[in-house]
Image (spheres, grey):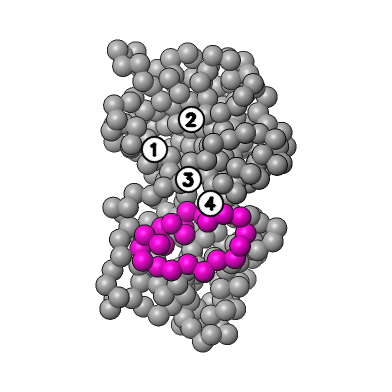
Amino acid sequence: MEIIKTDNPKKLLLISTQVYPTPPLAYSGIEYLVYQIACMMRDRGWQVWVVTTEGSHIPGVECMPLTPARNDNPEMTAYEGIKPGLMQTGWSLVHGHGHMGCEYLAKVENPALNVIHTMHNSRPWATAPPVKKPNLVTISKWHRDYVSGTIGAISEVCYNGIDIQDHHQIPLSEKEDYILFMGRITTYKGPHEVIRIARELGMKAIIAGEDVLVEDQRYVRKIIDECDGRQIKYLGRVNRNIKVELMQKAKVLLLPLLPDYYGCFELVITEANACGCPVVATNRGAP
């Protein structure tokens, strides 16, 4: 990683995850948000670099591939690969979006480094970052209060956003009569509850979302087996265009988050609403 020397002092380094490309090719949240930030800051005249996976491409932005992770601590593997570049002093701002916030390890060694970290899950750390007054961003008021109450860290709230041009409503005459689940195919997200509700109501349902990088493939297989392909259809991973189309046509999006999971900010709610799809969700965290 090498900083290009120019007369422009505004140099932004965004750190995405080591999971999906930026922008993501299929269902994803964090990588899509990093992509939006990169494009927005590029359009405002900043020079932007994004640390991301191989295969990423953002016009006008330098994408630097992460080292493929091959152990049980993939973010630390990635951090070791980008550490030499992080330790340089040419960055105006380093904005991390990974789950572990490894950029703060670089700030411990280089206190002059300007670091900000957006937290995308409820409690990634047992304690606050080991620096004085860390710059942390949480993604809802509930998330801010939860982080403050658990690790004692102060943060500022910045809600996740979407590009409204990528989401629009369709005429009511084009709507279809199905319930939609869109999310990770994992127990705490509750796709099995959507299937149960659809059967009890005698309604059609579509189950879509991330089903590869999940905790339990046996659960994924169970959900697939419960979908008959007629009343309950299983799609699994879908790209963003299909995701938007599914939300546009759905009668309702169900988000039955279950204990002990709390949603810090479920981006799919905002996306569904922008597509004219109502949302019914359990009260687990923040919208």
Q: What residue type is labelled 4?
A: Phe
Give the distance between the C-alpha atoms of the residues marked 4 and 3, in whole angstroms.
8 Å
Where does label 1 land, which residue?
A: 37
Identify the residue at horizontal 56%, vertical 76% (top origin).
195
Q: What element carries label 1?
A: helix
Q: In this view, does 273 lie to the left or right of 262?
A: left
Mark nearest the camera among 2 and 4 is 4
Circle number at residue 129 = none
Could you tell me which residue is drawn at 68 percent across and 24 percent down?
130
Mark 3: amino acid: Tyr
Quadrant of the rendered image containing residue 110 = top right
Amino acid at dot 2: His
Image position of 40 (left or right of 16):
left
Instruction: Please say if 262 is above or below 125.
Output: below
Q: Are marks 4 and 3 in contact (CB under 8 Å)?
A: yes
Disc 3 is placed on an element classified as: loop
User: Between tags 4 and 1, which lies in front?
Assistant: 4
Question: First in sequence: mark 3 or mark 2?
Answer: 2
Which mark, by number, is residue 265? 4
Q: Residue at position x 53%, y 85% from top?
A: 201
Tell me the CA gap for discs 4 and 1.
Answer: 17 Å
Q: What stretch is highlighted in magenta?
A: 265-287
